Amino acid sequence: MPLPEPARHVEHLHQLYRRLTGQNLSLRFDRQRFWYEFLKAGFTESDSEQVITYLQREIRAGRRNVGALKLSNLLQLDRFEEDLNISRVHLRSPPPARHRRLSRRPNPCPLPSNNKAGRKLSGTFDNLKRISAFFSRTNLISSQGTVLYPLYHDISHRQRRAVSR
């Protein structure tokens, strides 16, 4: 006489569990009851497979204990439902901060030429360029790129006038 439908389904689920976990557990009455309650709660074979593979991945990563795969722990329905929901979560990493900053923030310091502060800053850049050119003309920069006479008061009066022009 063939087994009734729920009994065959329970048998099939138990074989799937044994195959995925490598455990050789017999299907006694108390385990049949666990599987029957599992089916009665609306869970499916694919749910079982998803949670088992999720738990195995978590165990390998060291975030879960091997005991999570014990049949008596796995088939606690509240915990199973929680593990199933967690296994379905797809966390998205935030986009790199650099790209987010560049795309969302406008330039904090625009330099329009008609702006007084912009003209002053532009003049400062021009002065820096002149000073740099002066140092490169007068050989005050070493071959390594360090300034040999960095202090302005160390420069002669004639050299100061050349910088200020």
Image: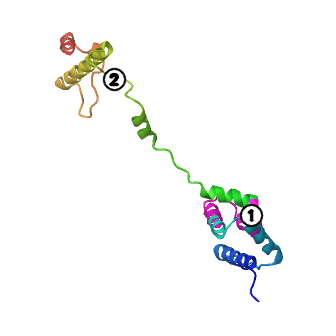
* Mark 1 lies on residue: 41
Q: Is residue 124 above or below residue 85?
A: above
Residue 96, quarter of the rendered image: top left
Which segment did they paint magenta? 51-77
Q: CA distance from mark 2 to mark 1?
A: 63 Å
Where's residue 38, x and y in %?
A: 74, 67
Task: Name the foreground residue: 77 vs 145.
Answer: 77
Identity of the amino acid at label 1? Ala
In this rendering, position of residue 53 left or right of residue 142: right
* Mark 2 lies on residue: 110
Image quadrant holding the N terminus, namely bottom right
Task: Name the foreground residue: 146 vs 88.
Answer: 88
Q: Residue at x 26, y 18 (%)?
A: 113
Identity of the amino acid at label 2? Pro
Task: Name the foreground residue: 24 vs 61.
Answer: 24
Can residue 11 be seen here? The reply is: yes
Disc 2 to disc 1: CB gap under 8 Å: no
